[in-house]
Image (spheres, rainbow, N blue to C red):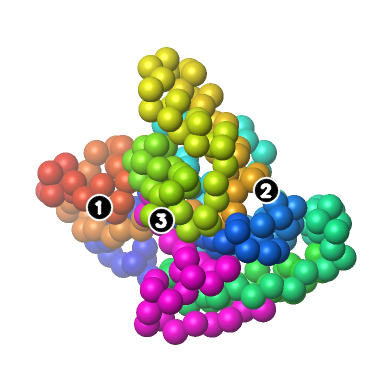
Amino acid sequence: LLQRAPGIQVLATSGTEHYGFPMDTRAAPFSDNNVRQALKYAIDRQELVDKILFGYGEIGNDHPIGRSNRYFAADLEQHAYDPDKAKFYLKEAGLDNLAVDIHVADAAFAGCVNSALLYSEKAAAAGITINVVREPNDGFWSNVWMVKPWSATYWGGRPTEDWMFSTTYARGAPWNETFWDNDRFNELLVMGRAELDDEKRREIYFEMQDLVSNQGGIVIPMFGQYVMAHSDKIAHPEEVSALWTLDGFRAVERWWFA
């Protein structure tokens, strides 16, 4: 509607904002990485982008580093909806089928419950039954997130890879919502902070994204865009920050009257 309104321009930027479904990797069946991989191949990511974000987003690859980050691993193999591959990983876990509860509320992110329902519908083709438990919005972050074995989450992301990884994936991090503890990942985290060679640092962060994507405990199906509307009497630089909305909250400094 805003796009059709006279005198209004709509601006969308792709950054680090992402939505996910974290699993407690200490708790069965999520303690088995084969089960986690099965769940990653049982979701139709593009469907969620189209139906939940109305196209204003991009598919995720089960790690938190966005395309706007400096060391984004663009060549990392993309997890795609593949019921047969999901079945393969279930078999590797010694299972013919799987039934799990996912605890969600729209307090996690707008459209969260519907996202889980779409996930459940597509996972059925892989022999996975996802029981969507709708929790109250009130108290979700205290009573469900990091409490229930499988829930939902939202992150605005961070401007650097180290900041994002240190906040939610490092050993002992207070917001490590999957309780994931990977020795190689934690070793690389320290190495990345000390490495001055840019190419070597890039390789470190690429490997870390690979580890989280293929061994971590979170399904990140989509990254959202920051969608803004402004008067056509307002101008802005050609490149607008993708770190948070309103040009990284610097529109008041960087935008001007046309």
Q: Is residue 243 left or right of residue 40?
A: left
Q: Give the labeled residue for mark 1.
A: 246
Can you tell which of label 1 and label 3 is closer to the viewer?
A: 3
Q: Position of residue 48 (x, y in %)?
A: 58, 64
* Residue 79 in sight from this viewpoint: yes
Please name the residue shown 30% across and 42% down the image: 241
Q: Position of residue 116 (x, y in %)?
A: 59, 72
Q: Where are the magenta residues, as a range?
A: 131-157
| Quadrant in the picture for the N terminus | bottom left
**Separation of residues labelled 2 and 1 (CA atoms):** 31 Å
- The vertical placement of 123 against 215, above or below, is below
Q: Give the labeled residue for mark 3.
A: 175
For label 1, the crowd category at 10 Å Cα-Cα, with few meaning under 14, some 14 to 19 and many 20 or more, is many
Q: Secondary structure at mark 1?
A: helix
Q: Position of residue 60 (x, y in %)?
A: 56, 50
Please name the residue shown 31% across and 51% down the image: 244
User: What amino acid is found at the position of numbered circle 1 in the picture?
Assistant: Leu
**Separation of residues labelled 2 and 3 (CA atoms):** 25 Å
Q: Secondary structure at mark 2?
A: loop
Residue 236: quadrant of the picture: top left
Closer to the chain start, of discs 2 and 1, is: 2
For label 3, the crowd category at 10 Å Cα-Cα, with few meaning under 14, some 14 to 19 and many 20 or more, is few
User: Are circles 2 and 3 on residues that touch, CB within 8 Å?
Assistant: no
